[in-house]
Image (cartoon, grey):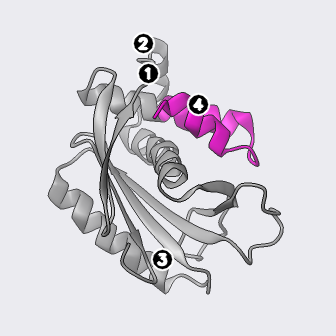
């Protein structure tokens, strides 16, 4: 997965500035513990796939701009989770979700009307620089959050473990 290409394509209904912002954050998070390229495990209840993640290492200026580790991890996780959702399900970000929906984004197959949420799913995302235990703990918490959100749309929760090279996904209405 060429992170820059996928994460930018994914935001075709968003602005290029947001896509670039999330991409920068992902590059910073990936660079904390790794040199490119790296193989990540893309995991859900039904399958495990290895994906090659490639990125351009950030320069000093970029690292300093993303000096807030929490913000970088959150925004970097958006880029990686959206890329993983595209790879796994062919679903793309079509717009940001409203507060209290239990999700960060609405995702749908390419070409769907951004005003019609009928064919959409909600996407709830988290990122961490911790271990596999924390990835699993957060996935359970994100599934719960999506389940309790004020929306009747199905949802997918995704947690990106930058340090452990793991992207774990689960459908909220069923086990993937």
* Image quadrant in which you'd find residue 71: top left
Magenta span includes 23: yes
* Image quadrant in which you'd find residue 141: bottom left
Q: Residue 60 got which mark?
A: 2
In the rendered image, is residue 21 in sight? no
Front of the two marks 3 and 4: 4
Q: Earlier in the sequence, mark 4 or mark 1?
A: 4
Q: Label 3, secondary structure: give it.
A: helix
Q: What residue range appears in magenta? A: 1-25
Mark 4 closeness class: few <14, some 14–19, many ≥20 residues within 10 Å: few
Q: Earlier in the sequence, mark 3 or mark 4?
A: 4
Q: Earlier in the sequence, mark 3 or mark 1?
A: 1
Say if 151 sits above or below 2 in the image.
Answer: below
Residue at mark 3 to residue at mark 4: CA–CA distance: 28 Å
Say if 17 sits above or below 81 in the image.
Answer: above
- Residue at 60% across, 71% down: 121
Residue at mark 3 to residue at mark 2: CA–CA distance: 37 Å
Q: Residue 5 got which mark?
A: 4
Q: CB of mark 4 within 8 Å of CB of mark 1?
A: no
Give the dominant element type of the magenta stretch: helix, strand or loop: helix
At which x and y percent is residue 142?
Answer: 39, 70
Q: CB of mark 2 within 8 Å of CB of mark 1?
A: yes
Residue at mark 4 to residue at mark 1: CA–CA distance: 24 Å
- Residue at 46% across, 59% down: 125
At which x and y percent is residue 92?
Answer: 63, 54
Front of the two marks 3 and 2: 3
Relative horizontal placement of residue 4, taking residue 107 as reference (left or right) = left
């Amino acid at each position: 997965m060429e992170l820059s290409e996928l994460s930018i394509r994914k935001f075709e209904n968003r602005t290029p500035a947001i896509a670039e912002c999330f991409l920068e954050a992902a590059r910073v998070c990936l660079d904390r513990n790794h040199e490119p390229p790296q193989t990540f495990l893309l995991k859900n209840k039904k399958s495990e796939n290895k994906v090659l993640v490639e990125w351009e290492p950030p320069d000093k200026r970029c690292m300093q701009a993303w000096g807030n580790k929490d913000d970088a991890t959150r925004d970097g996780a958006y880029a990686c989770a959206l890329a993983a959702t595209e790879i796994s399900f062919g679903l793309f970000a079509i717009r940001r979700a409203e507060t209290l929906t239990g999700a960060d984004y609405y995702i749908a197959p390419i070409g769907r009307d951004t005003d019609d949420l009928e064919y959409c799913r909600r996407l709830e995302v988290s990122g961490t620089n911790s271990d596999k235990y924390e990835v699993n703990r957060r996935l359970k918490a994100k599934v719960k959050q999506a389940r309790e959100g004020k929306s009747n749309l199905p949802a997918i929760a995704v947690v990106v473990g930058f340090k452990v090279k793991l992207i774990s996904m689960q459908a909220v209405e069923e086990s993937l």
